Amino acid sequence: MDGRREYGFFVQMKIRINGEEKEIKEGLSLAALLDEFQIRPGRVVVELNRNIITRAAHGSTALKEGDALEIVHFVGGG
Amino acid sequence: MEDHFELAGVKYRSRLIVGTGKYKDFAETKKAIEVSGADIVTVAVRRVNITDPNKENLLDYLDPKKYTILPNTAGCYNADDAVRTCRLAREAGVGKLVKLEVIGDDKTLFPDIPATLEAAKILVQEGFVVLPYITDDPVTAKKLQDIGCAAVMPLAAPIGSGLGIRNPYNIRIILEQATVPVIVDAGVGTASDAAMAMEMGCDGVLMNTAIAGAKDPILMAEAMRLGIEAGRKAFLAGRIPRKLYATASSPLEGILG
């Protein structure tokens, strides 16, 4: 299945999140992924393959094999 | 006397802009900022730690309704990364203000001026309110002002060095030619440094380490607030000229014979 493998009931896919490779359920939306990682969408900004995804589009953005996500937030700085 | 700090058409009460880095915890950050009286606070943009997403977020302690959030591009070494960081920051929904810093050297953290100019052009075009961190160079300040930056922010000394204003003459030249606010950014060590910047006629001072790194950050935050206020008032009052010889303060008539 071209880089994918059967895992339990779900087909897993590999994506990169903040530079780390992760396996997630195929077809997961961005909103569902944030939920799974317990990340509050109101406090982060997400870039998918170098394009910023607005909060309104989190639910309708389906992730696919090989995607690269950057999830950032504000931290202390000068 | 009414005295406001006006930046890009918005009036602020305080001329002190403070950073949020290097504090012990968010509670101390919050307290120091409150005591400093600052209206504008800087923040950095960083990756969320996805394996341990901290439930607490800086913005939980820093109400964006109360403070103007000024995201920085700290850690960016080229124009592309700086522009990318600003776009991400804007998407967070805290406004269009950005502190543009493109670092050119690890050891001094001096800015890469060509890259700063390049990024500033793009950001101004995209509607950002750009506040660039620069070396104390009048030519660079003029160029960034001409590009359309909302202020220029020459350093007093290297970031976190606490050396104070190393070249007051360059700052004076920058002030003379400026048509936008001049904010001294970085290198302030103590309250007198902040006062000196204000006495010279600077519009504001931006600092982080001087407060966060003090033994008692809360007390230093207060000292900085007072230093800024004292310096600004002294500037508005108009200081006496410096003279080499004495002028008596008491009447010369009626002295006992």
Image (cartoon, coloured by chain):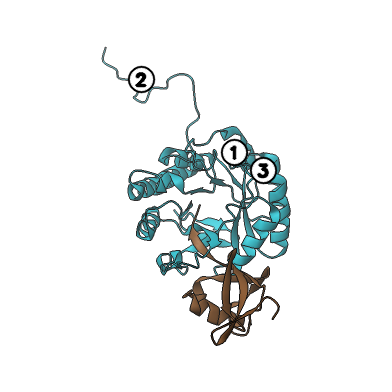
The residue singled out by tag 1 in the image is B171
Q: Is residue B223 above or below residue B70?
A: above
Q: Chain of mark 2?
A: B
The residue drawn where x is 49% and y is 27% is: B242
Between B114 and B180, the residue placed more toward the observer is B114
Quarter placement of the N terminus of chain A = bottom right
Q: Earlier in the sequence, mark 1 or mark 3?
A: 1
Residue located 49% across and 64% down the image: B49
Cα distance in 3D space between marks 1 and 3: 10 Å
The picture places residue B84, in percent across and down from the top left corner, at 66, 62
In the figure, the shade used to draw chain A is: brown
In the rendering, which numbered label is found on residue B252?
Answer: 2
Q: Which residue is mark 3?
A: B177
Vertical side of B35 occupied by A72: above or below: below
| Residue at (54, 82) in percent of width and height | A32
Is B77 situated above or below A21? above
Comes first in the chain, label 1 or label 2: 1
Colour applied to chain B: cyan
- Residue B73 point in image, percent of width and height: 59, 55
Q: Residue B86 at x, y = what percent?
A: 62, 62
Estimate how packed mark 2 is, as few (under 14), some (14 to 19) or many (20 or more) residues with alpha carbons within 10 Å. few
Q: Which mark is residue B241?
A: none
Q: Mark 3 or mark 2, which is nearer the start of the sequence?
A: 3
- Check contact, mark 1 vs mark 2: CB within 8 A: no
Identified by mark 3, the residue type is Gln
- The amino acid at mark 2 is Leu
